[in-house]
Image: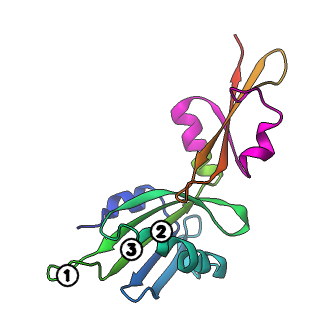
Amino acid sequence: REIETDMIFSSRFSQVFIVNRHQHIIFSKAFDWEQKKFQEVEPGQLQIIEGQLLPWIQKTPQEIKKGFFIGSEHRPFLMASWPLMTKAMEQPAGYFIVFREVDSALKKRFQDMLQLELGFSVGSKEEWSQSLSERGILLTGRNRIQGMVGFPDIFGKSNLIVRVDIRRA
């Protein structure tokens, strides 16, 4: 399968990894889009790939995977992975993995597309649901309504909370 390089650059993924068939990271670089230069990847991110992402990817090793996970320092990341296949192999020779932090630029992009004010939080459903009604709605004053929903990450845990702030009519 071909890796969609246009998608990688247009999505501004900031970390790139190549993992071989023996589950060793053989290439890892971060890219700073503001300074337009490569830098080293944080050690915490490498541990997450080796300890959490690779076992998840290898459950169905020949599939392209996309989703999000909570990275080091409890920051949310979008990720995608592609198996690296050769014509003679039935199992992948390795994986190409990219990450992008859900940062202020991505948040603004979502807000502009949806025409809504959004917020992202990391935590468990129990931590934020106590202040909400059963439907996940909170009245925040006479003119505003705030809704929250937890999204499951690649491991099935609802630990990314998206808040939507809407002006009341």
Residue 41 can be seen, yes or no = no
**Magenta-drawn stretch contains 134:** yes
Please report the bounds of the magenta region as a residue range: 108-137
Q: Quadrant of the C terminus?
A: top right
Choose mark 3 or mark 2, whichever is in front: 2
Q: Secondary structure at mark 1?
A: loop
84 vs 42, left or right, is left
Question: Which residue lies at the image location 71% right of the left edge and 19% below the top edge?
Answer: 167
Pick the front one: 10 or 37: 10
How packed is label 1: few (under 14 Cα within 10 Å), some, or many (20 or more)? Answer: few
Tag 3, which secondary structure? strand
- The residue to which callout 1 is attached is 89
Q: Earlier in the sequence, mark 3 or mark 2?
A: 2
Q: Secondary structure at mark 2?
A: helix
Residue, disc 2: 56
Q: Nearer the viewer, residue 75 or 30?
A: 75
The reply, left or right, for residue 38 in relation to residue 84 is right
**In percent of the image, x 83 and y 14: which residue is there?**
142
Q: Label 3 belongs to which residue?
A: 96
